Image (tube, rainbow, N blue to C red):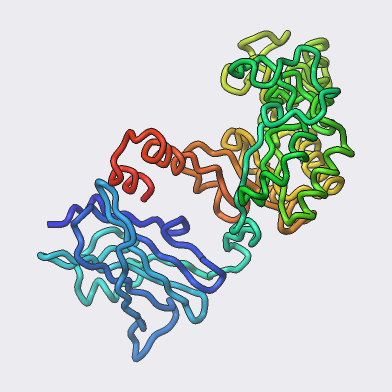
């Protein structure tokens, strides 16, 4: 007998969605090895013939398996862009009907009970997930500027270390800069790279720059606007793209906004820019990234903060023609802000790429109104464990990827 509790399908999700504004993709999950065959019963909810609903039957294809589950897939093109559907699941012993009311007996009465079916009321092209075409053929290379190449020693900080003199640490500097990236473009192009993702380049005291002081200024140890403009233009001349790192979840504690709060407390004009529990501010009474005191968390529900961050996002598109934003700690920022962000940057540059840093299942951010993609660490981890560390067998890697 089948394990009914293992059967799962969620409409309006990655189990049922518009693929291109006309075509609908449908998926269902069953216990591994349970089902021999699954048929999709589908049709237009309003189409009847001699008093009976006009249904179609389509065999589904098993597309993936894990240690515990099988996944089945079908593709349909509803002629009127409306869809009503359910499943007939078959094993060696029985056929069952699975619809919006769960598992039901497979018989004529069930098939004719319309409220047992899942619905996609209308397949809207406007609601269909879309990503820029150019990204699909882009090979990205991530650059941590301080560690990539020192192209201009005159830009290096006073405490710079000789390149390669020691293993890098969290607090040391080797003098990498934007000129170093410009100097290595032939090397990167020879590797087959056609997209550069640069971690934060904005002014900040650290070597990693995720503790931003001012989002409008390039860190002076990396270069200046003209040098960055040169980098972008040379990349574009080669048919290459560039994506910057937006740190909008938090800001550096040395930033003017946070320092104003430290100085003026509850009287600061920026007090509502952050999540502060009491005044005066001290370590432990405000929200921050993880438990890092020098990264106070921004209140992205605040209209002033929203305008500030959106203006920054648009500035780097307008002034330098960047091709993408990678969004740091994106899972800790509210969805309402990211929806507004998507509308703003897409209106400015329709083929701009939006990549979110999500460390886990990312479906809520990938419904077509927020991000084009995520960094997909759950995919990366089994790749590293199998190909690099040889810590898991191929079967385990395949199951995790599926």
Give 43 or 33, whichever is nearer the viewer: 33
Give 121 or 1, whichever is nearer the viewer: 1
Q: Residue furthest bottom?
A: 50
Q: On the rendered structure, is 40 left or right of 276?
A: left
Q: On the rendered structure, is 383 left or right of 196?
A: left
Point 64% across, 9% down: residue: 283
Q: On the rendered structure, is 202 left or right of 106?
A: right
Which quarter of the figure has residue 117? bottom left
Give coordinates of residue 240: x percent, y percent. 71, 52
Q: How many marks?
A: 0
The N terminus lies in which quarter of the figure? bottom left
Give coordinates of residue 101: x percent, y percent. 31, 60
Residue 214 visible to an observer of this rendering: no
Which quarter of the figure has residue 187? top right
Point 38% across, 36% down: residue: 385
Give 44 or 34, whichever is nearer the viewer: 34
Q: Residue furthest right?
A: 226
Point 61% across, 15% down: residue: 166
Q: Say if 18 sits above or below 32 in the image.
A: below
Q: Say if 79 sits above or below 300 in the image.
A: below
Residue 361 visible to an observer of this rendering: yes
Give coordinates of residue 298: x percent, y percent. 70, 28
Q: Say if 21 sits above or below 101 in the image.
A: below
Give 7 or 130, whichever is nearer the viewer: 130
């Amino acid at each position: 007998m089948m394990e009914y509790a293992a059967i799962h399908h969620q409409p309006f999700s990655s189990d049922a969605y518009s693929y291109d504004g006309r075509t609908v993709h449908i998926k269902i999950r069953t216990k591994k090895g349970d089902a021999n065959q699954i048929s999709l019963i589908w049709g237009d909810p309003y189409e009847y013939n001699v008093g009976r609903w006009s249904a179609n039957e389509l065999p589904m294809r098993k597309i993936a398996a894990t240690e515990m589950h099988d996944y089945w897939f079908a593709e349909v093109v509803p002629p009127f862009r409306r869809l009503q559907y359910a499943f007939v699941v078959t094993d060696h012993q029985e056929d069952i009907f699975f619809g919006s009311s769960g598992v039901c007996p497979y018989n004529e009465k069930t098939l004719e009970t319309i409220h047992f079916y899942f619905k996609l009321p209308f397949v809207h092209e406007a609601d269909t997930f879309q990503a820029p075409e150019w990204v699909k053929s882009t090979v990205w290379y991530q650059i941590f500027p301080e560690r990539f190449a020192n192209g201009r020693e005159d830009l290096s900080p006073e405490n710079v270390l000789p390149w390669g003199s020691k293993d890098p640490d969290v607090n040391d500097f080797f003098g990498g800069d934007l000129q170093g990236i410009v100097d290595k473009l032939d090397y990167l192009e020879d590797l087959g790279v056609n997209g550069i993702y640069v971690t934060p380049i904005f002014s900040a005291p650290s070597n990693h720059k995720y503790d931003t002081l001012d989002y409008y200024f390039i860190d002076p140890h990396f270069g200046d606007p003209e040098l960055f403009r040169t980098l972008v233009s040379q990349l574009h001349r080669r048919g290459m793209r560039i994506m910057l790192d937006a740190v909008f979840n938090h800001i550096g504690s040395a930033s003017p906004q946070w320092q104003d709060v430290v100085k003026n407390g509850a009287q600061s004009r920026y007090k509502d820019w952050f999540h502060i529990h009491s005044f005066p501010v001290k370590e432990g009474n405000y929200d921050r990234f993880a438990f890092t005191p020098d990264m106070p968390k921004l209140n992205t529900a605040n209209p002033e903060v929203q305008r500030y961050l959106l203006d920054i996002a648009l500035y780097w598109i307008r002034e330098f023609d960047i091709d993408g934003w990678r969004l740091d700690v994106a899972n800790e920022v509210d969805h309402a802000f990211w929806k507004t962000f998507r509308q703003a940057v897409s209106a400015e540059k329709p083929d701009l790429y939006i990549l979110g840093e999500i460390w886990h299942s990312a479906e809520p951010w990938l419904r077509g109104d927020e991000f084009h993609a995520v960094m997909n660490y759950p995919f990366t981890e089994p790749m590293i464990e199998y190909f690099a560390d040889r810590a898991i067998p191929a079967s385990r890697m395949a199951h995790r990827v599926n």
